Image (spheres, helix red, strand yellow):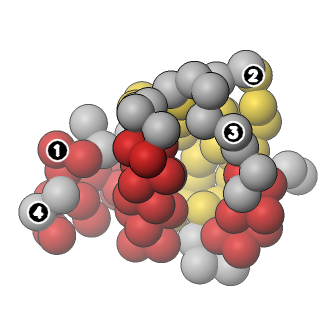
Amino acid sequence: MNPIEFQNNNWIMKGDITLNQVPSIIKLTIGYEWKNSVLIDLIEVEEVDTSLLGLIFEWKRQAKKYNKTVSVKNTPANLESLAKLYGVEEFIS
């Protein structure tokens, strides 16, 4: 299963997003041209770890270079808990 589905500027994440999946996701998104802001939909995400937080932060840094934004919706409860633990919940809401 492909871990990300691109629908214009909507990125629908799927399955587990942990340290094992992050390298393949980075390969899929590394060439994004940042012509638009991006909405990351986590509706189909199952298991997560802190590497997803790092991935979201990296996308936000990349978008900022081009005066674009990255927004997240349908955040799983376990990712919200991790973000709260690290004091970064405002970055994924």
Mark 2 Cα shell of 10 Å, populated few (<14), some (14-19), many (≥20)? few
Q: Position of residue 24 (x, y in %)?
A: 78, 67
Q: On the image, numbered disc 2 is attached to which residue?
A: 7
Q: Amino acid at mark 3?
A: Glu
Q: Earlier in the sequence, mark 3 or mark 1?
A: 3
Q: On the image, numbered disc 1 is attached to which residue?
A: 90
Q: Position of residue 77 (x, y in %)?
A: 33, 47
Q: Nearer the viewer, mark 3 or mark 1?
A: 3
Q: On the image, numbered disc 3 is attached to which residue?
A: 33
From the viewer's perspective, tell me whether residue 28 is left or right of residue 51: right
Q: Vertically, is 70 above or below 56? A: above
Q: Nearer the viewer, mark 2 or mark 3?
A: 3
Q: On the image, numbered disc 4 is attached to which residue?
A: 87
Q: Position of residue 3 (x, y in %)?
A: 76, 52
Q: CA distance from mark 3 to mark 1?
A: 25 Å
As drawn, the residue found furthest toward the front would be: 66
Q: Earlier in the sequence, mark 1 or mark 2?
A: 2
Q: Vertically, is 58 above or below 43? A: below
Q: CA distance from mark 1 to mark 2?
A: 25 Å
